[in-house]
């Protein structure tokens, strides 16, 4: 692992299917690695995600056709939240960049 300065917000790449939703988190930079993650659709509360492998996180929920927010806890102890980072018409294979706020 090489500590580097992050340029821009965290990046979220969507993959999966209608009932298996996976997100790859990149551009974490100096904050270290992702240790916990949650997703929230416009019609759901915060849903904890499980680590699949590496920085890929998943849950078995249909989140299509709703804007998505992410809450990421990193190894430095910070929690970064990206509100409405993916629009309601997001598609698998797309990558979105969040504007994070430390909590």
Image (cartoon, rainbow, N blue to C red):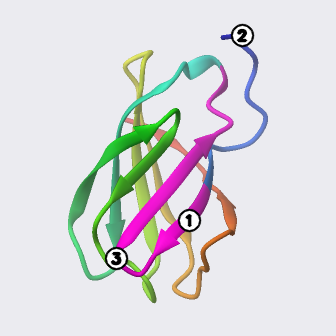
Q: Residue beneath label 1, please? A: 15
Indicate left or right for 89 with 71 as reference: right
Q: Residue beneath label 3, please? A: 19
Tag 2 or tag 3, which sits nearer the N-term? Answer: 2
At 24% across and 59% down in the image, what residue appears? 47
Q: Position of residue 80 (x, y in %)?
A: 45, 39
Majority secondary structure of the magenta segment?
strand
**Gap in Å between the C-alphas at discs 1 and 3?**
11 Å
At 66% across and 44% down in the image, what residue appears? 9
Element at label 2: loop
Q: Position of residue 28 (x, y in %)?
A: 62, 31
Based on the picture, tell me whether residue 15 belongs to the magenta stretch.
yes
Which image quadrant for residue 7?
top right
Element at label 3: loop
Q: Residue beneath label 2, please? A: 2
Above or below residue 47? Residue 75 is above
Above or below residue 99? Residue 29 is above
Which image quadrant for residue 97?
bottom right
Label 1 Cα neighbours within 10 Å, binned few <14 / some 14-19 / many ≥20: some
Identify the image quadrant of the C terminus.
Answer: top left
Indicate left or right for 59 with 15 as reference: left
Based on the picture, tell me whether residue 94 belongs to the magenta stretch.
no
Tag 1 or tag 2, which sits nearer the N-term? Answer: 2
**Gap in Å between the C-alphas at discs 3 and 2?**
35 Å
| Pair 2/1: label in front | 1
Q: Which stretch is magenta?
A: 13-29
Label 2 Cα neighbours within 10 Å, binned few <14 / some 14-19 / many ≥20: few
């Amino acid at each position: 692992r090489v500590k580097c300065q992050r340029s821009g917000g965290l990046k979220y790449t969507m993959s999966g299917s209608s009932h298996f939703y996976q997100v790859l988190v990149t551009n974490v930079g100096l904050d270290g690695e992702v240790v916990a993650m949650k997703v929230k659709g416009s019609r759901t509360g915060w849903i904890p995600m499980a680590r699949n492998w590496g920085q890929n996180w998943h849950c078995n929920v249909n989140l299509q056709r709703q804007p998505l927010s992410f809450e990421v806890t990193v190894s430095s102890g910070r929690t970064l939240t990206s509100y409405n980072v993916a629009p309601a018409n997001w598609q698998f294979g797309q990558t979105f960049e969040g504007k994070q706020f430390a909590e």
